[in-house]
Amino acid sequence: DELIKELGGLHNFMQWHGPLLTDSGGFQVFSLSDTRKIDDDGVTFKSHLDGSRHRFTPERSVAIQENLGADIIMAFDECPPSDDYDYVKKSLTRTHPWLERSLAAKTRADQALFGIVQGGIFPDLREESGRFVTDLDLPGYAIGGLAVGESKPQMHAMLDVLQPILPQDKPRYLMGVGAPEDLVNGVMRGVDIFDCVLPTRLARHGSVFVLGGRLNLRNARFSRDPKPIDSQCSCTTCQQFSRAYLRHLVKANEILGHILLSTHNIHFLINLMAQMREAIRQGTLAQFGADFLQHYS
């Protein structure tokens, strides 16, 4: 993070002048469950690269994110296993003070710090966390601890619990969710922002989004297919390249294949969000969502 700061922050480093968001490290700690130790002050973990020990606290997390210079930063939180009631309840006694410490540590006025609502799959804990976080009157609110193994109906139920609690005039961010059907279900439940590795991860494995679901371009049936991924798609991949050529790139493990398929998948999701924004303006979101979910599988 010091190097990024020296080079002018992420915007300059990447030459990307659109919005940027950084996470606090809470989910990454969750994913390192075999090599970390959590206490009320913070987290100690071992690097998966060289075994070196590192210490994360709310203050350290905010300092790193301020050095990186994203527009939206996250409060440090614990992302607990979603189905252990006693543990999830105990973890809120860490996550909520960590949010207050994150706020106290923040020094940059040009960054928006979002608080993270936790609570697993338990309505009473989600409501408790939602009310605590919203009482702090933050610029936006993240919903964490979902898409970590629970069922889709359980995820939707937690969003339903939070919909009347989180302010309607501030952005709501569902963390780690990126499947098209999940975006539609999320927006229909009041979510505004999503992030996920899914479109690029699928692309690396030869899978692409289309209106009817997904296509796996590794399938031999595409080896002589001259059509684009989607003839109605305006992305550069669909405008220039055939399924046969894209399959060749994927099978040859060419980095260009990953780039072209990622371009298509990200375009698909951006276009889907644009369609939902228009449906909201027209007052037809419920019908749009029902039609999309009926045809997407």
Image (cartoon, helix red, strand yellow):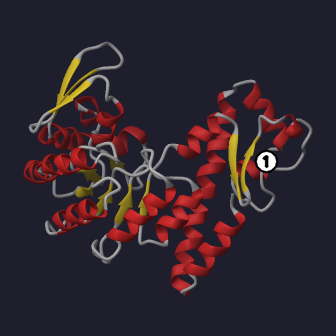
Residue placed farthest to the top in the image?
50
44 sits to left or right of 273? left
- Using the image, determine if residue 217 lies above or below residue 109: above
- Give, as a three-letter code, the residue at label 1: Gln
Residue 261 in the image, given as x and y percentages of width and height? 67, 42
129 sits to left or right of 30? left
170 sits to left or right of 266? left
- Helix or strand or loop: what does disc 1 sit on? helix
Q: Quadrant of the image for the N terminus?
A: top left
Residue 248 in the image, given as x and y percentages of width and height? 80, 31
Q: Residue at x 20, y 23 (%)?
A: 54
Tally of marks: 1
Q: Residue at x 69, y 46 (%)?
A: 208
Q: Residue at x 34, y 48 (%)?
A: 82
Residue 144 in the image, given as x and y percentages of width and height? 33, 53
Visible residue check, residue 77: no
Residue placed farthest to the bottom in the image?
283
Q: Residue at x 9, y 49 (%)?
A: 101
Question: Mark 1 highlights which residue?
Answer: 240
258 sits to left or right of 83? right
Residue 185 in the image, given as x and y percentages of width and height? 52, 66
Q: Quadrant of the image for the C terminus?
A: bottom right
| Residue 210, picture quadrant | bottom right
- Using the image, determine if residue 70 lies above or below residue 212: above
| Residue 114, picture quadrant | bottom left
**Is residue 227 or residue 146 the one in the foreground?**
146
Visible residue check, residue 211: yes
Q: Residues within 10 Å of mark 1 (few under 14, many from 20)?
A: few
**Is residue 170 or residue 93 the one in the foreground?**
93
